[in-house]
Amino acid sequence: MQSAIETTLDIQQIRQDFPVLHQEINGRPLVYFDNAATNQKPQSVINAITQYYEGYNANIHRGIHHLAEQATAAFEASRRAMQEFLNAKHWQEIIFTYGTTDGINLVAQTYGRRFLKEGDEIIISTMEHHSNIVPWQMLCEEKGCVLKVIPVNDQGELILEEYEKLLTERTKFVSCVHVSNSLGTINPIKTIIDKAHAVGALVLIDGAQASSHLEIDVQALDVDFYVLSAHKLYGPTGMGVLYGKKEILDSMPPYRGGGEMIKEVTFAKTTYNDIPYKFEAGTPNIADVIAVKSALDYMAGLGKENIAAHENDLLHYATEQLSELKGLRIVGQAAHKIGVISFVLDGIHHQDTGVILDQQGIAVRTGHHCTQPLMHRFGIAGTTRASFAVYNTRDEIDRLVQGLCRVQKMML
Ligand SMILES: Cc1ncc(COP(=O)(O)O)c(C=O)c1O
């Protein structure tokens, strides 16, 4: 695991920015450790949504009146902010989606259906979220492509030698997670991308978990597609981004048909709009797209490296403290991790653990975390997962440890 770097952030001050944190659950102050599922929203993001509805709610792009222009400008400002966040070369490479799942389905259903054919091989990994498994399985069923899977070792790291063995001239697409939501493992995606490109395959990286913790530079990575969800970035739910290289997006057929994605419609023939609009049919989630810029501004204000340093400190502290607990086994001990700790308690079902922690005001996630094949790999049905965000503290980790002692006392 990386060594801890000291944070310069005032965490108590930061906590004031998140209204939801200031409540009691079951008579105890809330400890929110379910950040990998969705993290909480600062007041500035909440304000951006209400300001849109209170001040300039209008449909975008087509209107010529003042409110429509104001809404369009704010919407497109978010696209530019996302371009900067990912260091994309062109603003047209930022497609707004409903989230990571939607972005992956878009690529599988457009690029995949148009360009992949029977016998072509698609590589994913054992630690994929279901949203980066099922769309490819659906495509394989339809097109007769073959799905190959990179295995993981006992620490929860991808076995790169096995990946290299899977790569052949039949490999046409690699789709891999940047950071595992179940284990916290940070994958060496630059190596994965370069090796795929060496055999002529395209690469999609699922950045759902990585985007709020790591710097992402799509040009330096030379990645073909990168997908993320705003709700894991201190932003709103139901909104995400697909980054794609311009020339590849240009070559792809549209995803959904409808308004906005067309140039001209006649009953004889429809011509399609340019990117990004070709992939943004219908009225989008305008308020939430606008609010994502506030989320990016919020993170930029704190400094992503400061956020990462603080979360890394929490990861170290939690790993140390939890390792002291008898009968607790951490699942996922990769050398490079973000602040996610999955564990199992001997003789206690993870669901019981979650319920008893909730009774103490501590929110964790239990189950398979939408990674059933990964759970099978480790021979378990599920884990209890604590995942950290910038507003979490060491005191809260102490509360978790005390809570787990109580779980053991009650259940054993
Ligand atoms: C690694 C990973 N990929 C994909 C997803 C799916 O994200 P969404 O539900 O926002 O589409 C998640 C959500 O937890 C995730 O953690």
Image (cartoon, rainbow, N blue to C red):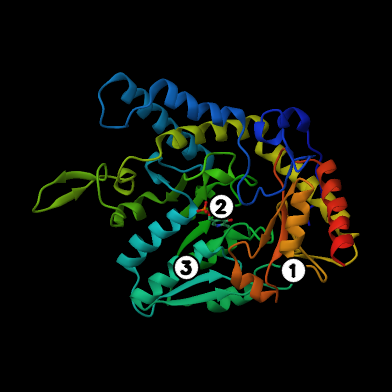
Q: Position of residue 200 (x, y in %)?
A: 43, 68
Up-down relation of residue 104 to residue 32 (above or below) = below
The local crowd at label 1, few if under 14, some if 14 to 19, many if 20 or more residues have their Cα within 10 Å, is some
Could you say which is closer to the camera, residue 359 or residue 310? 359
* Residue linked to disc 1: 155
Name the image quarter holding the N terminus.
bottom right
Q: Position of residue 245 (x, y in %)?
A: 40, 51
Res 200 seen here: no
Residue drawn at x 74%, y 68% as measured from the top left: 155
Q: Does residue 358 appear to the left or right of 104 in the view shown?
A: right
Instruction: For marks 2 and 3, give the one nearer the viewer.
Output: 3
Identify which amino acid the numbered label 1 is placed on: Gln
Could you say which is closer to the camera, residue 198 or residue 331? 331
Q: Position of residue 29 (x, y in %)?
A: 78, 38
Residue drawn at x 38%, y 80% as measured from the top left: 119
Mark sitting earlier along the chain (1/2): 1
Q: What is the number of the mark on residue 246? A: none
The local crowd at label 3, few if under 14, some if 14 to 19, many if 20 or more residues have their Cα within 10 Å, is some
Identify which amino acid the numbered label 3 is placed on: Val
Q: Position of residue 146 (x, y in %)?
A: 43, 78
SS at mark 1? Answer: loop
How many labels, in total?
A: 3
* Residue linked to disc 2: 208
Quick check: which quadrant has ligand 1?
A: bottom right
Q: What is the number of the mark on residue 134? A: 3
